Amino acid sequence: MSKTSTRDAAFFRETMLPPEPPPIREAGAVKWLRENLFSGPVNTLLTVLGLAIIWFLVSHFWDWFAHSVWNADSLAQCREIIAATWGEGARGACFAVIRERWHQYMFGFYPPSLYWRPLLAFGLLMVALAPILFSETQQIRRIVLVATTVATLLFMQVLGVPTAAFLLSAIVMIGATILAERHAGWLLIFSALYPLIGVFLLWGGTLWAPLMVLAGIGLGWLGWRLVGIVSPMLAVVAGILVTLIWWIGFTGEAAGDLQNLLPLGITSVQSEKFGGFLLAITIGVAGIALSLPIGIILALARRSDMFLVTSLAVIFIEFIRGVPLISLLFVASLLLNYFLPPGTDFDIILRVIIMVTVFAAAYMAEVIRGGLAALPKGQYEAADSLGLDYWKAQRLIILPQALKISIPGIVSTFIGMFKDTTLVTFVGLFDPLKGISDFVRANFAWKGIYWEPFIFTGAIFFIICFSMSRYSMYLERRLQRDNR
Amino acid sequence: MTDAPLPADQPFRVSMLVYDRRYRSMTFQVIVFILVMAVAWWLVNNTIQNLAAQGKDFNFGFLFQRAGYDIPQTSIPYNSDDWHLRATIVGLLNTIIVSVLGCVAATILGVSIGVARLSKNWLFARLMTIYVETFRNIPLLLWILIIYALFTEIMPPPNAYRGEDPAWSKILFDQVALTNRYTAIPALGMTNDPGTLDLGARITVNWAVIAFLVAIIGGWFIRGAILDRAQAIQDRTGIRPTTWWINLAVMTVPSLLLIWYFGLHLLAPELKGFNFAGGINLGNAFVVLWLALTLYTGAFIAEIVRAGILSVSHGQSEAAFALGLRPNRTMNLVILPQALRVIIPPLISQYLNLMKNSSLAIAVGYMDLRGTLGGTTLNQTGRELESIVLMMLIYLILSLMISGGMNVFNSRVKLKER
Amino acid sequence: MALGSNNEVNMKKTVFLGSIAVAGMTAGMGMADTLADVKARGELNCGVNTGLVGFAAPDANGNWAGFDIDLCKAVAAAVLGDPSKVKYVPTTGQTRFTALSSGEVDMLARNSTWTFSRDTDLKLDFAGVNYYDGQGFMVPKDLGVTSVKELDGATICIQTGTTTELNLADYFKANDLSYQPVNIDSNAEGEQQYMAGACDAYTTDISGLAATRAAFADPENHVILPEVVSKEPLGPAVRHGDNNWGDIVRWTLNALIAAEEYGVTSKNIEELVKSSDNPEVQRLLGVSGELGAMIGLDNEWAKRAIQASGNYGEIFAANIGEQTPIGLTRGLNAQWTQGGLLYAQPFR
C-alpha cells in the first residue's frame, strides 16, 4: 500500500484522536480517594476512624494552640490576656514562658556573655563530624558545612555575641568550610583534635591544659619511635605508657606552671553552670565519642578466639546491658566515690559522662559485633590469605567495612543515648525536660505551667532525633547500594 | 587462625611467648587476666579503704530491720512494721507487674500498629507513621511526664462523679472510672468463695486462682495431645481429623464451668465517701507508667513488626498459593514463621528495654524496685553501696531471665539449617 | 583526727585524662582537713536543695538565693573572706548524704532533719539547728477538715525518701487511722498533685508547706492543720570526724544567732566594731580576744559572716519572714529572750 492511496481514502484520519478523559471514577482526586481511602468496607472504616482521631485531636487542642500568648511576664498575666482577648473561659497556650526562659532551656546557667562558646563548639562539632559522617559526597558535605556555618553565625547574631567573638567564630567556621573544599583530608586532623577544642571551648580555663595533653601524645610518639629501634612490640607499649604517665602524673601541674609563667586562656566555666540542651548534647556527644573506641575493642574481644578475653567481654557487656541506665547514674552519683582512691572527688558531670560512656560502650559493642558478623566470611579469608596479621587485617580490611555497615546502628544508639541523657535529672543535674522545667516552675511567675515547656522541649528533641534517624536511613540506603 | 605447622622440635625459649603464635595468645590472656585482676583488686581495695574511712561496713543486715514506710500499691500484704526485705520484694513485684503488663500491651499495640502501617489506607497508614515517629523520637521521660500531667490536670477528682447529674460518668459499660488519683476498675467477686491457701509469710492464694490455673494448663496439655494424635493420624492416613472445636472446648469449657461454679462476677466501683470503693483502685502512678511504657515501646515494636513482615519476600506467599495453600495456612505456615525469625531477636531487646525503663517509675513515684530498695530503703538506712549493688543484681537477674526465656523461644522459631 | 591520720589520704589524687582533669575536675580531699581543702580550693562546696522557694532556689539568672544559701555564704565569708566563693551543689533527697560523706560537698545546708541515726549511723555531724520545724498537713479549706484526726482514709501526698514518710506512717498507725499515700518525687510534683486535687492533703515540713502555699494563686483557700506530728530540727551537717571544720560551721551559725541577740546587724556592724563596749560583742567581732585563732581563722571571721547577708534575724526576714511571700512567723525560731528556742552558746 502506498502513501498516496491511503491519503486519498476518505475514511482515513489525518490526525490522531485526542485521548478521551478517563471515567470520573478512575481519574484524579476521586480515583485516588477511592483507591487509597475507600477501597472496601474495612478501609472505609479505618478512614472514618482516622478522621475521628484527627477531629478529636484538632477539636481539643486547636483553640488552645490558636490562643497562644507570646508576650507576658507571668502565667497569671497570660491568663488575663487570654481572657481579655478571647473572652472569659477561653483556653490558651502561654508560650511567653519559652520566650522569657528559652536561653535556660538551651544553655542552662551558662554565662550569657559566653554563649558564643557552646555555639562555636557545636558548629565545630559538625565540621569535625563532616569527614566521618558526611563524607558520602562532596555535595552533602558542602551543604552540611555551609548550613552549619550560616546557622551558627545566625544564632550568634540573634544572641548578640560580642563582635570579636563573632568575627573569630566566623573566620574559624568559614575557614573550615573552605578547607573542606580544598583539602578534605586535612579535616580529619581537625576531627582528631576536636575533643580538645570542644572541651576547651565549653569549660574554658587555661589553654595550656589541652596543649599539655597534646604534648603527652607527642611524647608517646617520641617514645614509640625511640623504643621502636629496639623492638616494635615494646614500642607500642612504651608509647602508651609514656603518654599515660604524662597525662596522669604531669599534665595538670605542667599546665598550672606554664599558666603561671604565661597566662593564656579564656574564662573558665564550672560544670554546674551547664544545663538544658547544652548539658544533654555535651553528655551525649562525649559519651558517644568515648564509647566508640571502647565499643570496638569490646566487640573485637567478644569475637576473639581467646576464651578468657571473650568471657570477660561477654560478662561486661551483658552486665551493663542488663541493668537500667538510672542505676548506673546512681552509681555515678552515689558509689563512684567508693571505688576510687580515698579523697578523689570529681565533677558530677564527668562522673555521669563516664557511666553513660560505659553504658553506651556495651550497646555499641553489640552494634559493631553485628557489623563484624554481617561481613562476608570471604573478607576474613582474603585478609588471611594476604598474610596480614590480626591487627593489620582488622585495621585495613575488616573494621572499615564493618564500621560502615554499623553506621545506622551507631546512629540509633546515639539517638537512644541522647534521649536517655534526660535521666540525669535524677542525680540533681538540670536536664532540659525536668530539671530546667522544675526550676522554671519554682518561680512564682511560672508556677503551674506544664504543657508549653513539654511541647517546646519535645519539639527540639523530635527535630534532633528525627533528623538523625532520617540521615541514618539515607545512609543505610546508600550503603546497601554500595555493597551490591 | 590457620597457622602453618611449626617445627615441633624447637626448644622452648622465653621470646617464644611473644613471637610464637602458639604461645602468644596464652601470654596475652595471662596479661589481660592480671590486668583485670589488678583493676578489680584496686577497686575493691579502694572501696574497703573508703568504707573504713567512713566507719561503715558492708553487710546486708539492714534488710532485716523495720522498714517504717508505707507503700501505696502492694501485691502481697505489707505494712510499715515489715522488714526492708519485704519492702524490697514488694518493689520487685511491682516492677515485674508493670513490666509484664507493659510487654503484653506493647506487643498487642505494636503488632496492630505495625500491620496498620502497611495498610493500603493512605490516611490511616500516615497517622500510624506519625504516631510511631513521634514516640520514637521523644524521650520516654517526657511521655511519662506528659501522661502524668494529663491524668492530674485533666482527669476529674472522684467527687466529680457525685450527685444526680455528675460532671463525669464512668466509662466502658459503667465499669471504669478515671480520676486524677486512681483509675477505678471492677474487681472480681465470687458468690461461692472456696477460701484461700496460706503459703506462709502472710502470702495467700485463693483456691479459685489455683483451680483456673490448673484448668488452663491442663487444657493446654490436652490440646497438645489432641494435636499430636491428629498429626499421627494425618501421617498414617493423609487425612487430618477436624480438631478445632475439640480444642476450643478443651480450652474454654473447664474455665466456663469454674466461672459458673464459683459464681464469678464483676464488682463495679462505686463512689463511697471521698473515694471509689468496691472495685480496684489502680494508682495513677501505675497507670501512667504502664501507659507510657506501652505507647513508647509499642512504637518500637510496630517498626520491628513492619520490618519483619516486609522482610518476607513476596515470592514466598506466591509460592505458597501456587502449592494450593489457603491464605490462613499460608500465613501460619509460610509468612509468620519467616517473619518471626526477623521479629523475635529485636523484640527480646525491646522487652528488656521496657523492663529497664520501668525504673523511670521514679518520675511518678511508683514504688518499684528502685523506689523501695534503691529509694526509700537506701535513704533511711544510708546503705547506698549494698542497696545499689543488690538492686543492680536483681535487675541483672531479671534481664537474664527474660533474655534466656526468649532465646529458648527464639531457637524454636529459628530457621532450622540442615 | 581519726580519719585523717593516714598520710596517703592527704595526697591529692588526680584521675586520668588530663584535659578533662583540668577542665572539670576538682581533686579534693575527702575526709582529712576540710578547712585546708576549702582554702586551697578557694571555694566552698555547699550542698543545697534542688529548689525550695525561700530556702534554696536559683533565681531566673541561675543565682542561688534563700535561707540555707545565706548560711553557705556566711561560712564562705568566714573562711574565705568572700561570700560569693561558694559552689552550690544541688542535691536530691537521695544524694545529699552521700555527697557529703564522699567529700563532694564540704557542708550540707539542705533542710535536713537532725536525727539519731543520721548523726551516728550515717556518720554525719550536725552543726546546730538553723530552723526548728515540724511536720504538718495542708488541706484545701473546702474539705472542711480541722484536724489531722479527721483525715481517716484520706489520700495524702508525700515525698519519698524523707523522714516525713516515716513520721506519717508512725503517726497514722499510732492513731489507728488509715490513709492512702501518693508518693511523689519532688516538691514540684507534690504541688502539682495537690493543686490538681489528686490528694486530699499534702504533708511535709510546715515551712515547706508555707512556701508551697505562698506560691498558690489562692493561698487563702488552703489551711495548714494545727497538729504538728513531729519534731524536725533542720540544720547544717558536716562529715563526722573533722571536728575543726564542724566547729567552724557550728560557730558561724552561732555567730549569726548571737549577732541578732546582741543587736548586731549588717548595717550597724562597722559602727559597733568601733563603739561597742559589750565585751561579748567585742569578742564576737574580733575587737578583743583571740577567738578566730582557736578555730584556725583570723579574728574577723564572725564579722565577715554577719556582713555576708546579715544576722539570723535579717536572713530570716529577707528569705522567709512575714514580709516575704512565704510569710513564716518566727515562732520557735525566735531568740530565747523572745520565747523561742534560738540560744547561741556564749562567745568566750
Image (tube, coloured by chain):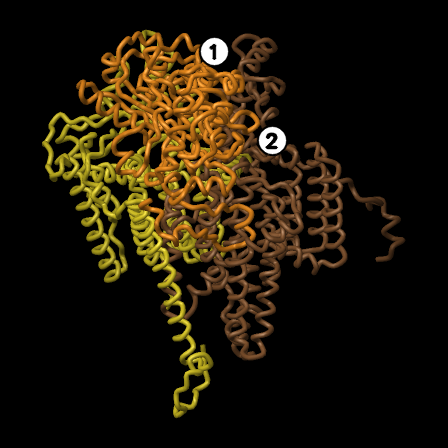
Chain colours: A brown, B yellow, C orange
Instruction: Tell which subunit mark 1 falls on.
Output: C
Q: How many marks?
A: 2
Looking at the picture, does residue A60 appear above or below residue C15? above
Q: Is residue C203 left or right of residue C83?
A: left
Looking at the picture, does residue A14 appear above or below residue B3? above
Neighbour class for label 2 at 10 Å: few (<14), some, many (≥20)?
some
Q: Which residue is mark 1?
A: C323
Residue B407: horizontal and vertical position, in percent?
33, 55
Secondary element at image label 2: helix
Residue A410: horizontal and vertical position, in percent?
52, 53
State the CA–CA distance, disc 2 to disc 1.
31 Å
Name the one closer to the observer, B213 or A433. Answer: A433
Q: Nearer the viewer, mark 2 or mark 1?
A: 1
Name the one closer to the observer, B309 or A478. Answer: A478
Point 54% across, 54% down: residue: C18
User: In the rendered structure, which amino acid carries the disc numbered 2?
Assistant: His
Residue A482: horizontal and vertical position, in percent?
61, 61
Quadrant for the C terminus of chain C in the image: top left
Instruction: Tell which subunit mark 2 falls on.
Output: A
Q: Which residue is mark 2?
A: A103
Point 31% across, 41% down: residue: B100
Secondary element at image label 1: loop
Q: Is residue B9 left or right of residue B75?
A: right
Neighbour class for label 1 at 10 Å: few (<14), some, many (≥20)?
few
Name the one closer to the observer, C250 or B33. Answer: C250
User: In the rendered structure, which amino acid carries the disc numbered 1?
Assistant: Gln
Question: Mark 2–mark 1 contact, CB under 8 Å?
Answer: no
User: Would you identify the image quadrant in which residue C129 lies?
Assistant: top left
